[in-house]
Image (cartoon, rainbow, N blue to C red):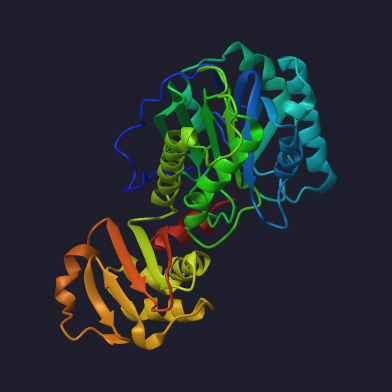
Amino acid sequence: MASNVRSPLAPEEFPVLPPLDGVTFAVAETGIRYKNRPDVLLALVAPGTSVAGVLTTSKSRSAPVDWCAEKLKGGTARALIVNSGNANAFTGSAGVKTVTQVAKALAAKAGCKPQEIFQASTGVIGEPLNPAPIVNALPQLFGALRGDAWAEAARAIMTTDTFPKAATRKARLGGVSVTLNGIAKGSGMIAPDMATMLSFVFTDAALPPRLLQKLLAKSAAQSFNCITVDGDTSTSDTLLMFATGKAGPALKGLKSEADPRLKDFSRALDDLCKDLALQVVKDGEGAEKLIEITVTGAENDKAARKIGMAIANSPLVKTAIAGEDANWGRIVMAIGKSGEKAIRDKLKIWIGGVQLAKNGMKAPDYREAEIMPHMKGRSIVIKTDVGVGKGRATVWTCDLTHRYIDINGSYRS
């Protein structure tokens, strides 16, 4: 369940998200696993809303993920239902039955087809999810729908999170001002390889599903797909985006995501996704420090990302940073194990802007005392050049403290 200890990296306050035309929320306490806290979220979107999604690449993905993967083919949405506490993963035919029953009941209440219902679940794996508490809560949820319940929505999807995560951005699209709002949850089992644990983005822009999908996939690739807490890809990772079209009519002749009229919207979406992704890292289970790792000089961008993630997922690197130890030898180790090309005798490493290694050796003028103030801070910046080509990537992670063991050692108890 959610930790009582708020992450020291958490933002000071929940952001102000404006109401978004065509989107309303409601939450309910159903007791699926947690007591005396909301654990089900309903988001109702306007008829004809476009939907896009990026889903986990796990080979043991949950029943809700399978459901969303199939329904995304339709391109339109009417409602989203999310529960926390039970992932409905590794539940076989029972899991399929649950998502089907919930979708049919919600569709009947919303006056739409089950194909326009999207679902997500997060929590314990391997325990059947009884659909009754969710279905029985639908009348209450529909009676409580509001356009300003962003904070309640973000809290209802939390598990081990210590703070609710949200962000908002404005953009211009064809001379019209549009809004993008998003919420996310995630704290552990974070190595998405798709999107994030759970994240839902809403906009009042009018965009066709095909273009929305391309824009979202691009944003995920440079934000959610560039974070890790513990190297574990969840069975339930789901990123969905809904575009209600209420801000104004769709632009004529809009066929490509490279259309210059989409530039500002794309910028805002990229920024929003990065904001949400970094909030997930900042809430990494037991995290005390945010770590940014930039890799340059790789064979290509894909290789750079792989090297960056090898550093970011190294328990030795992460524990050294937790102990405020500038042990750059562990970074060298992680680069070497990545499997990507790196020229040892051209290798360079910086931490906090201070060069520790150059030409495959310790930098002659490096003095560890220079870097200690940076190591004691909340944000650690690592840069390495592997001397091969022009590939570049930036990834983010957090340190690994004993509290990660404390949280996960008692997760089901």
Would residue 350 appear left or right of 412 to someone viewing this image? left
Q: Position of residue 258 (x, y in %)?
A: 53, 42
The quadrant holding residue 166 is: top left
Residue depicted at 78% across the width and 42% down the height: 95
Farthest residue, direction top: 143
Q: Nearer the viewer, residue 250 or 235?
A: 250
Q: Nearer the viewer, residue 398 or 137?
A: 398
Q: Position of residue 40 (x, y in %)?
A: 60, 29
Q: Nearer the viewer, residue 24 or 97?
A: 24
Residue depicted at 66% across the width and 55% down the height: 57
Q: Is residue 325 visible?
A: no
Q: Nearer the viewer, residue 68 or 162?
A: 68
Q: Is residue 239 above or below residue 361?
A: above
Q: Is residue 344 visible?
A: yes
Q: Position of residue 377 (x, y in %)?
A: 23, 58
Count all numbered tags in the image, as a single digit. 0
Residue depicted at 56% across the width and 48% down the height: 195
Q: Position of residue 9 (x, y in %)?
A: 32, 48
Would residue 203 appear left or right of 51 to someone viewing this image? left
Q: Is residue 143 above or below residue 39?
A: above
